[in-house]
Amino acid sequence: MTAEIKSEDFLREKISPHIKRLIEEGNNAIELQFKSLSKKLKKSSFKFDPLAEDTLYSPARGLTHKFSNRLLWKINLNCASYCQFCTRRRQIGLENKILSRKDIKKGINYLYQHKEIEDVIISGGDPFCTPKATEFLIKEIDKINSVKVIRIGTRLPIHSPELLARKEILSLMKIISKISTKKPIFVLLHVEHPSELTHMAKNFIQSIKKTGAIVLSQTVFLKKINDNVDVLASLFTGLYHLGVIPYYIYRCDYVRGLEKFICPIRKEMLIMTKLRKTLSGIAIPTYVIDVEGRGKIPVPLNFWRGTNLSECNDFDGKKIQI
Ligand SMILES: *Cc1c(COP(=O)(O)O)cnc(C)c1O
Ligand code: SF4
């Protein structure tokens, strides 16, 4: 359980040298993601943790076990830069930024006791920001026969691609190579705008691909940043041409502090519909909304008549208001 959040400006600004350079070159789409524009949060009905990651579904520190066959494991709360639209802005960069070996052992025991978990999603923060801990964790998970798939989420190739040269990162890459010959490892990149795919970022992504890991990407719809057909067409095509499969595009979570990033749902739906008409199916991510406590529900595209975008059925068939 996370302690009650008292500070009103808890996600401070952290901008890596690489991102800083892009901002200085006049990249507005990047600046809007990382520059902290206002310190005080406006009054809002949104919660800090609407998906209840840290309460309802957390059997041990760092773990969120919401779906029986999949486990989300937040190994740290640190990133090379802080995205102001982060869904976990309530905890990124706060104290106890990294799980101890003891915490990790507890999680490993939980995996041994829960044979129904076949898929472990290592997230954070950014697991590539603590390569040693991530290496330790994937080596431990590798020994557990009931876990068939490992996923690692990262934004490091976008934030600080120069860190590819670090000894610890190279060592993590080696372990990924080794394990991925036995168990599939999916690396989930987080990319928001085509201008993030710089030469150096591409180089980092190519190195991940060389390990044998399957590389996917995730994107969040962000107002004034990527809520545009041409921008997203260029992003998804760029990823596809790199051999990266766009996996999800999320509607921005209704998290306190993210109000200014949320686009109208109808606009998003129409953008995704247009993209579906022109891009390869492989380059089209599934457009989902992570509904409070329910799961990632696909938003319908505008091909069928009479769809109501203000309510949907959850995974149990219960009607919910969006
Ligand atoms: C998103 C998520 C997953 C993984 O869902 P997939 O649809 O399999 O990618 C697992 N656990 C939690 C808590 C999640 O939020
Ligand atoms: S990289 Fe991910 S976890 Fe880190 S601040 Fe950005 S969105 Fe949040």
Image: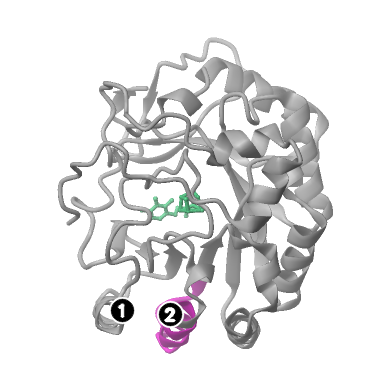
Q: Which residue is mark 2?
A: 133
- Of the 4 image quadrants, the one containing the N terminus is bottom left
Q: Nearer the viewer, residue 40 or 87?
A: 40
CB atoms at circles 2 and 1 under 8 Å apart? yes
Task: Please indicate whether residue 2 sits to the left or right of residue 173 in the image.
Answer: left
Left or right, residue 268 beside residue 77: right
The residue range painted magenta reads 133-150
Evaluate whether residue 281 shows in this view.
Answer: no
Asked if the stretch drawn in magenta spans residue 147, the answer is yes
Residue at point 28%, 83% (across, down)? 105
Q: Is residue 207 depicted above or below 275 in this figure?
A: below
Q: Residue furthest top?
A: 306
The quadrant holding residue 187 is bottom right
- Residue beneath the point at 41% across and 31% down: 258
Which quarter of the rendered picture does the C terminus lie within? top left
- For badge 2, the amino acid type reads Ala
Q: CA distance from mark 2 to mark 1?
A: 9 Å
- Numbered tag placed on residue 104 in the rendering: 1
Q: Looking at the picture, which amino acid does disc 1 mark? A: Ile
